[in-house]
Amino acid sequence: MSEIFYKIRRLPPYVFEEVNRLKDAARAQGTDIIDLGMGNPDLPPAQHIMNKLCEVAQVSKTHRYSASKGIPGLRRAQASYYKRRFGIKLNADTEIVTTLGSKEGFANMAQAITAPGDVILCPDPSYPIHSFGFIMSGAVIRSIPAIPNDNFIKALEQAVRHSIPKPLAIILNYPSNPTAYTATLEFYKEVVNFAKKHQMILLSDLAYAEIFFEENPPPSVLEVPGARDITVEFTSMSKSFSMPGWRIGFAVGNERLISALIRVKSYLDYGAFTPLQVAATTALNSESDFSKIRSIYKKRRDVMIQSFSRAGWEIPVPHASMFAWAPIPPNFKNLGSLAFSKLLIEEADVAVSPGIGFGEHGDGYVRIALVENEHRLRQAARNIKRFLNQQKKGRM
């Protein structure tokens, strides 16, 4: 059996794996690699959340199969969070489903709504599952700009004029991974009006809703009147609660779309381990101090921006998310993001994510994750400064 399977054929090589192999090989040789690549939070969940997990895990019946759509208490807790945070009232039974992280939710929503050949409008650069979840489902991706401005709306208009068949859905992701762009409620209003006019679905990834550094918190597209008629929004507890390995996320919004997602999930999983869901419920229902996590990431952001600048690498200041979207230094621009990322591991002992992994328009950038403490970020800057100075002296 030598023929490559159809869905595998549609997927390009996973570029992050090339960087990971190089990183692992260096570590195997004893090199201390400062890993700023994967957005994998290093902070632990709050102690009371872990205590609840341990407590519930001692109850024997909680080790049985759980509920694919999420236990009722967790869905009610998510409804309460949306009411407090966005002023949106959701029906926990029909408008909310618990997912195994937002990544799984996106992929299974793609399975639920996509027919072969459907056109999906996806920002480029964007988080890979936004496009490849639909590609694996047989869709065709049409790229649109990632910056939420007038050019985004113009690209939507052009896509409707020139796409056959008419696009099925628009993907939104603000605060954005990888670019850290943020959107305003006015922008969302324009997109909702456009999507309703052309009978299109909106899928919004709001995983970084609580990691922001400006006075105004990022809005939800569901705050726009009428958005719920066409929209599902995905959130995650991975970053906001430092629970990435727990795989707890949510899809909320349009009842018909949520019903389709629930039906697909019912064939594929029995939901997350019940003690994880109960502890996640505790987290959502408690007065969690998001400001503490935001403060840590803000300090890391500031240290990274300042120390990397002193090292000779100027990086725009991100206003949200746990990432910086960094232009490749001019002297290395011709290499492309993958080769530059490999060079950083080999010569500076620093790992970052190549921008090409997020789309062709990301190739002039790398993504830097704020997942090391301030001391390690300063060490990364010193390593990079040495690397850049060697390059200037022609010793590379």
Image (cartoon, rainbow, N blue to C red):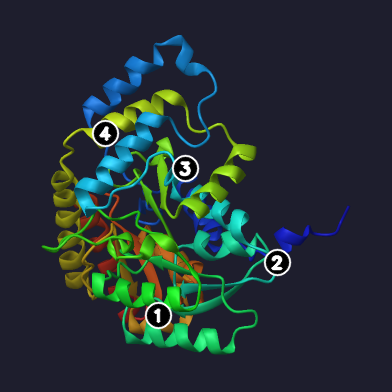
Q: On screen, 141 above or below 276?
A: below
Residue found at the very far right of the displayed protein:
1
Q: Mark 1 — residue?
A: 332
Q: Amino acid at mark 1?
A: Phe
Tag shown at residue 2: none
List the residue tagged with mark 2: 116
Asked whether the viewer can see residue 328, the reply is no
- Foreground mark, 2 or 1, reads 2
Query: How many residues crowd around disc 3 within 10 Å: few (fewer than 14), some, or many (20 or more)?
Result: many
Q: As shown in the figure, which amino acid type bears the numbered disc 3?
A: Thr
Image point 46% across, 10% down: which residue? Answer: 60
State left or right for residue 17 relative to residue 316. Answer: right
* Residue 116 position in % (x across, y down): 70, 66
Q: Nearer the viewer, residue 113 or 294?
A: 113
Q: Position of residue 76 (x, y in %)?
A: 33, 36
- Label 2 vs label 1: CA separation? 40 Å
